[in-house]
Amino acid sequence: MTAAAFWHGFADMKTVEDGGRFVISKGDGASIWDADGNRYLDGTAGLWFTNVGHGRTEIADAVARQLSTLAHYSTFGDVVPEITLALAERLAAIAPVAGSKIFFTSGGSDSIDTAAKLARRYWNQVGQPGKTVIVGRQKAYHGMHVGGTSLAGIPLNREHYGELMPDARTVTWDDAKSLLELIEREGADTIAAFFAEPVIGAGGIYLPPSGYLHEVRQICRDHDILFVADEVVTGFGRIGGDWFASTKFDLQPDMMTTAKGLTSGYVPMGAVFVAPNVAEPFYSGGTWWRHGYTYGGHAGAAAAAMATLDIMERENLVHEATRVQNALHRHLSPLADHERISEVRSGLGAVAAVQFADPAEAMPFVKALRREGVSARAAGQGAIQFSPAFVMTDAEVEEMAAATARALDA
């Protein structure tokens, strides 16, 4: 049989070809259907992104209207589509730092590399060109561009590519002293920025230890290092109760990277929120920042983002995410007592991880879970990721947890 042309990301293609594909044909609310018409609860909201749920024709209609008027244009130099300009103002109004500027990208990986480049360019602009080192954390995931791959704390994602970015460093994910030790060892005058996911996502869903985020934020202030909050996953309500984790924890980031929930995944788009202190040297005149993307601020994507924000506000989905958070914690936590499970991580945002005692069991469990009517994925070292849409009902969360228990027993 001739192999299909499609090459999957993050996959052993021999295993895929031998085992068959999970082909999705449609979605509605918190459910999806495969090509054979079988329904599944979408336990991950696609890939952390379908926050408002599937099948929102309001978003599709907004994109169609925009594409029929102006699909896109350049955003280089002094040019910008009208709707993209409006979206930037709307995002600035909910930014964790007042007066932030919005730099649009095509997605999360673009946003990370943009922030890494801007951090270095900023220090050069203010007369400290030696500050080039970018610091990430163990377990962290920051996309798969060169910068993000180098920053990530998941060794398997960096293997076999050679040295992509020599001045990238990794510190312990849960101990602020590790960052201090790096600063003492290499010197603050060499370090441009520290990147941190408020909740570690693809690395396994690890919640920050109490006080950790405030401590590393203060360390960055004390040593003149830019603090970058990677909110590609946690941004736009996923953290529950606030638009951003940076607001919830009062982090006042120098930069904040976003994507996913910005358009609820309906159209690719990302954005970097840049605090006034970082933007100022580039707004004072005489400076070009030679960076940008053809589809950064895409007009059709901007229409999707505006419609997504409309839904989020009208249906109070930022607060609904807290309801989903509580339901996940309530219904998944008992699974920690199962003999195959070592831990359930939940309680901060509409995310949860069910950790296998034997990490090797996680990947095959994904297919076992599908047989019980739930689509989820393995993340980190042997965890099952749950990050549903904010419109998932408590009854659906309970159904998802019950299906997980059945699959464990099976």
Image (cartoon, rainbow, N blue to C red):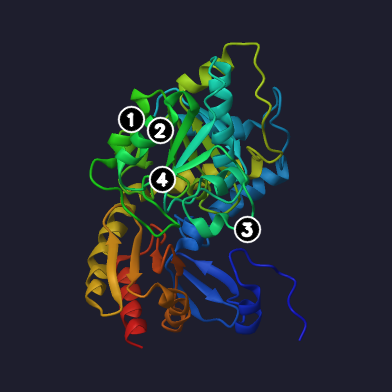
- Say which of 174 and 394 sits in front: 174
**Residue 197 bears which disc, if any?**
4
Instruction: Choose mark 1 or mark 2, whichever is in front.
Output: 2
First in sequence, mark 4 or 2: give its number.
2
Q: Residue 145 in the image: x percent, y percent?
A: 61, 47
> Which residue: 51% across, 29% down?
89
Compared across the picture, whether 66 is left or right of 57 comes to right
Separation of disc 1 and disc 2 at Cα? 15 Å
Kindly identify which residue carries mark 3: 160
> Which residue: 25% across, 63% down?
329
Q: Residue 97 in the image: x percent, y percent?
A: 40, 27
Regarding mark 2 in the picture, which secondary structure is present there? helix
Give the answer, above or below, for where 161 lies relative to 133: below
Q: Name the residue type under label 3.
A: His
Q: Residues within 10 Å of mark 3 (few under 14, many from 20)?
A: few
Regarding mark 1 in the picture, which secondary structure is present there? helix
Q: Residue 294 in the image: x percent, y percent?
A: 71, 39
Kindly identify which residue carries mark 1: 219
Q: Residues within 10 Å of mark 1 (few under 14, many from 20)?
A: some
First in sequence, mark 1 or 3: give its number.
3
